[in-house]
Image (spheres, rainbow, N blue to C red):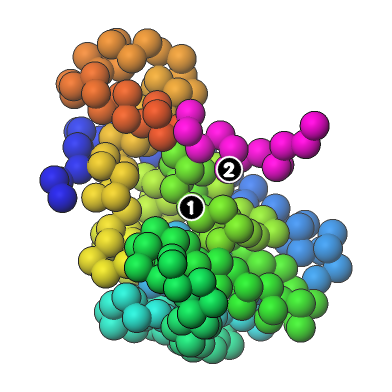
Amino acid sequence: MSAPDTVEPLDLRFSEGELAERRDRIQSFLRETVAAAGAERCVLGLSGGIDSTTVAYLTVDELGSDALHGLVMPGAVSSEANMSDAERVAEDLGIEYDVIEIDPFVEQIAALYPDAADDQLAVGNARARTRAVLNYFVANHEDGLVLGTGNRAEAMTGYFTKYGDGAVDCNPIGNLYKMQVRQLARDLGVPEDLVTKAPTAELWTDQTDEEELGVGYDAIDAVLAIHVEGGVPASATADHLDVDESVIETVRELYEASKHKRAMPPAP
């Protein structure tokens, strides 16, 4: 697979004051959402990636370590390094966590419909949906809320599994571009190696977000901010970012094709 298209990063980082205000807003949102639901605690799937790590740090900083239960859910395609990072985050924060292997569940699903057993995308999405079932199984038992880890770039390009990692009660970092998630993570004291590691949903072996999307996150952030949300024409956006217009078209197509993921299922 070819390397993803990249651009020189468009600086979407907050000023010091804006970052403090945004962090406070997110943490107030967390506290108010949990209180409004009458929940006892929160459940969070930990992948070892920057998004779930940032949500974990935000939650513990606002609600305390007793308020968060982490689930580390490795599968056959999960790297040992990522799972180790996930456990490291839980241990650094002092939260309760469990390690649950998902392959026995996914294998049973594939066995029930063998025609799809070799379909990489179908099996990959089954992994994401199995994790969602486990998140809610634990959350229901503990009278808790399932916290999402999706960011703004993922939401707008549809880079999440419908009823998988998209099945959550709230998305604390859902309004942050990837660059802003990294900035917030540093402000929270997340170790730098976790801030800069390559994102992966680990739906199949050696999968990375940016290779699957075909565009780097810096480019996605920039095109979404300028063209999709900012309304600047594609040609002007391409000129400003000094990239081929096909990069703008790719991000635009991801946004248009994933609208169904950002809305309730249609009814007549």
Q: Kindly check if marks 1 and 2 are in contact, taking CB atoms under 8 A apart as contact.
A: yes
Q: Quadrant of residue 247?
A: top left
Q: Is residue 4 visible?
A: yes
Where disc 1 sits, the SS reads: loop
Q: Amino acid at mark 2?
A: Lys
Does the magenta run of residues contain 152?
no
Mark sitting earlier along the chain (1/2): 1
- Front residue of 75/50: it is 75
Q: Which mark is residue 121?
A: none
Spot the residue most to the front: 115
Q: Report the span colored magenta.
A: 256-268
Q: Is residue 4 above or below residue 86?
A: above
- Front residue of 29/74: it is 74
Q: Is residue 80 above or below residue 155?
A: below
Distance between the Cα atoms at labels 1 and 2?
A: 9 Å
Residue positioned 56% across, 53% down in the render: 162
Q: Which mark is residue 160?
A: 1
Does the magenta run of residues contain 263?
yes
Residue positioned 44% across, 48% down in the render: 159
Q: Which mark is residue 261?
A: 2
* Mark 1 Cα shell of 10 Å, populated few (<14), some (14-19), many (≥20): many
* Mark 2 Cα shell of 10 Å, populated few (<14), some (14-19), many (≥20): some
Residue positioned 70% across, 42% down in the render: 265
